[in-house]
Image: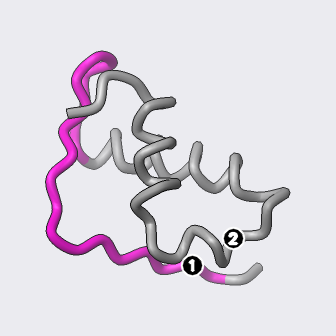
Amino acid sequence: MCHSKNELERFFSAAGAHIKQVPAERKSEFLNDFVTAYCQQAGCAADAIPVSFWCLQILAVKT
């Protein structure tokens, strides 16, 4: 369980296998967008963000 969006961003940054493929100058923006979308899909409360997975797959499209 994460207790803030910032904590969840740090978790995904450390646990995400492909985060190293995101350019350094876009990493913060990517993590913010990813966490925002994750929280919308999971219906998170601001102080209780559930994190439960056995495999995380991130699909990115170059624009």
Earlier sequence position, callout 2 versus callout 1 = 2
- Looking at the image, is 53 positioned above or below residue 28? below
Residue at 49%, 42% (x, y): give it: 9
Pick whichever, 16 or 41, lies toward us: 16
> Is there CB contact under 8 Å for labels 2 and 1?
yes
Q: Looking at the rendering, which quadrant does residue 60 occupy?
A: bottom right
Identified at 31% across, 22% down, the residue is 3
- The residue pinned by badge 1 equals 60
How is this picture coloured?
A: one colour
Query: Looking at the picture, which amino acid does disc 1 mark?
Result: Ala
Q: Nearer the viewer, mark 2 or mark 1?
A: 2
Residue drawn at 44 percent across, 66 percent down: 16
Q: Is mark 2 on a helix, strand or loop?
A: loop
Residue 55 falls within the magenta-colored stretch: yes
Locate residue 30: give its quadrant: bottom right
Residue 45 location, x and y as percent?
25, 22
* Whole-percent x, y for residue 40 in the image: 34, 41
Q: Where is residue 28 in the image (x, y as percent from the top left)?
A: 69, 47
Start-end of magenta stretch: 42-61
Q: Mark 2 points at which residue?
A: 22
